Structure formats: structure tokens, C-alpha cells
Amino acid sequence: MNKPTVNILSVSGGKDSTAMWLLAIEKGVKVEPVFADTGNEHPMTYEYLDYLERELGTIRRVKADFSRRIAKRKEYVVTHWPSKLQKDVPGQWIKISDEEDLVPPAFEPPDPYKPYNGVAGWRWEPTVKGMTPEETEVIVQRALTALVPSGNPFLDLCIWKGRFPSTKARFCTTFLKTDVIYEQVVMPYLEQGFKVVSWQGVRAEESHTRSKLPEREETPEGQEVYRPILRWLVDDVFAIHDRMGVKPNPLYKLGMSRVGCMPCVNCNKGELFEISRRFPAEIDRIREWEAIVKQASKRGAATFFPTAHGQGNGIDEWVEWSKTTHGGKNMDLLKAIELADDPPMCSSVYGLCE
Ligand code: SF4
């Protein structure tokens, strides 16, 4: 007997997932749009989702809850942190040159507990001495005070982990989106005997990895993944918005090349520059989050974008870097001129300006 099919369409508030929803409507396919709220979106994206609901129909909103995991973490902190904190943290070589394929030195400096700049292109981040039992107690108490759920999924994920995700450890997508949609939406349908088809708005043009994806595949959990706009170009995406009379997220007209977390851990230099000059409130929010997550971290250090041992000036250091030229040392004069003025009304990287 054929199982009834449900089409789950993951909506992010970005152009591709909206285009996919519009395609489903154009083809007369019934879909269930779902938005996994990370808690790290720009307010305009939430407003845009409300707009889409008014124009196209209801969006089911789901979000992760880390309160149980945070409670377990508290137990772990009490039991395991004292012994861990009393051990040394090994030093490491940090690359300070833009040169690619630079091999790290194969030796430690004479005193690994002190900074060392004697090797071209590298800086030695010193070994951190283990703490005394008294110091350890202070850190444990500080973390226990910080390990309190805020209700914001992104922040709570970082409080639980005691760190921010990064390009190398991108656990955010799994915990904030994939798992949430699977557990709260897909699994209940599978358990009721439905065939679940998950529509994903990814395009081959976006990256080499995405260009290798198939249009359809079965997952080990028993759902089918369908990527209906895999071969579309960005022009096709905006064309369907025009054809169906639906506006793209206004953030595209404000210099953003992608819509999702603001900022995303994958954010590039230009995007960070645009975010900091147009949306300083988002930078302020990240600075506040860094202060909270630091308290919940073992070494009292956590920054949104990676810095050595999570120390440094965090987001502010990166914002300053986003204003520099290639190489990161000199101020970009063009950006300095732009900063002296109000940001232009429209600076779409997709040429969306009317
Ligand atoms: S990869 Fe970027 S957009 Fe995706 S959850 Fe992580 S920070 Fe957010």
C-alpha cells in the first residue's frame, strides 16, 4: 500500500528557500513550510517571515531547547572541571601571515609559557599554567552562575558548549536546524506512517560541495531529500519572486549576500563590514553574548570568531579587521570614506537596486 506523502519545506527567510516555496505553489504541490529559529536572525528576517505568511500561507516555527543539556552540563562542571583546570593547556603556533601552505615550526620555543615571535609568519601562543584548587573553585562557581538557559537557541547552545561554533566546528546547523526539524516535524510524521519528502533550497552554483549533491536521495532515517532548485542560477531565483509578485528579503538590498544568522560563523570580511556599519545592534548583541559565554567556558575565554585560546577583543577586533585592506594591516581607504558617510540605501550584491 502506498504511504501518504508529506512535503516538508525548510524556509529560512532567504531567497532560495522562498523561491522553492514559490515553485511548489506554481506547480500546485502542497507543502508544509517550516522555519527553524536559531535566535540569531536579524529582526528584518522575522518581519519578512510574517510577510511571507501573509502572502503565501502559514509557516510552522520550531526551535531548539537546551535547558536539559545545560542542567547536565552543570553536573559535569562540578564533577570534572576541577581536575581538568588544574592541568596545563599546551601552547600552540598561530599563523599570522596570509601566505598559504606555510608549515608550522616543528619545535617549541625555549620557554613555552612565554609569547615568542622569533619565527617568520608565526606567533607562539604560550602554554597556560594549570590553576590552583582555590582558583579552580572560583571558575566553577562562575560557570554554575552562567549556566542558565536564556531561551535564545543560539545563545543557549553556546552556553551549553562553553564556546561558539566556528567554520571548523560548525555544530550550529546540526543542533539549531537539522536536528530540530527532524525531531519536531519529520520524526512524528514517519512514526505515523507517512512518507516524508524534505525540500531543500540549495543550488549547485553556491559551492563545489553543493554542485556534487544529487537532486534526490534517501537518508538513513528514512526520509527523501529533494532539491528542486539545485540547477537554478541566482537570476532564476529572483525571476520567480518577480513572476509570483513576492518581494525578496529586504536584507539583500542592504549589502547582504546571504540571509540567515547575523552574523553567520561563515561570514566573510565584506559581509562583516556591512553588518557592523548598518546593523551595529547585532554587533552589540554578539559582544554581550561573548561576555556570557566566556563565563560558562572552562578557560574564561570564548569569542564569536576564533581568536587564540578564545582571548582578545572578540567581535570588536574582527570588526576593526573588516575595515582593513587585504593583509589585515592597513585601513582600507575606500571603506574609511564609506564609513564617514551614511550607508547607501541600496548596495545589493545581486544588482537588485531599482
Ligand atoms: S552555519 Fe551560519 S547560518 Fe547556519 S546555523 Fe551556523 S551561524 Fe547560523
Image (cartoon, helix red, strand yellow):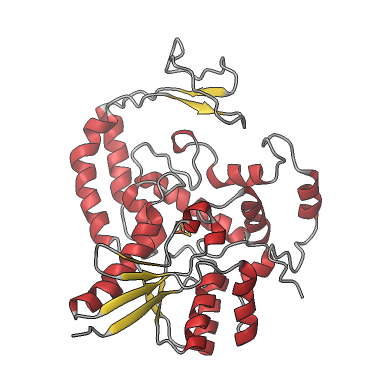
Between 117 and 201, which is closer to the camera in this rendering?
A: 201
Instruction: Examine the rendering and report whether any part of residue 57 can be seen.
Output: yes
Give the residue drawn at x 28%, y 33%. Answer: 136
109, above or below 22, in the image: above
254 left or right of 285 in image: right
Image quarter of the C terminus = bottom right
207, above or below 135, in the image: below
Between 147 and 216, which is closer to the camera in this rendering?
A: 216
262 left or right of 181 in image: right
Between 2 and 34, which is closer to the camera in this rendering?
A: 2
Q: Position of residue 219 (x, y in %)?
A: 29, 64
- Residue furthest to the top: 110
Give the residue drawn at x 42%, y 63%. Answer: 214
Image quarter of the N terminus = bottom left
Q: Position of residue 299 (x, y in %)?
A: 37, 36
Give the residue drawn at x 40%, y 83%. Answer: 31
Q: Position of residue 63 (x, y in %)?
A: 36, 69
How many numbered marks appear? Answer: 0
State which quadrant residue 348 falls in: bottom right
State which quadrant residue 81 falls in: top left
41 left or right of 277 in image: left
Instruction: Examine the rendering and report whether any part of residue 262 can be seen.
Output: no
Q: Position of residue 350 (x, y in %)?
A: 68, 66
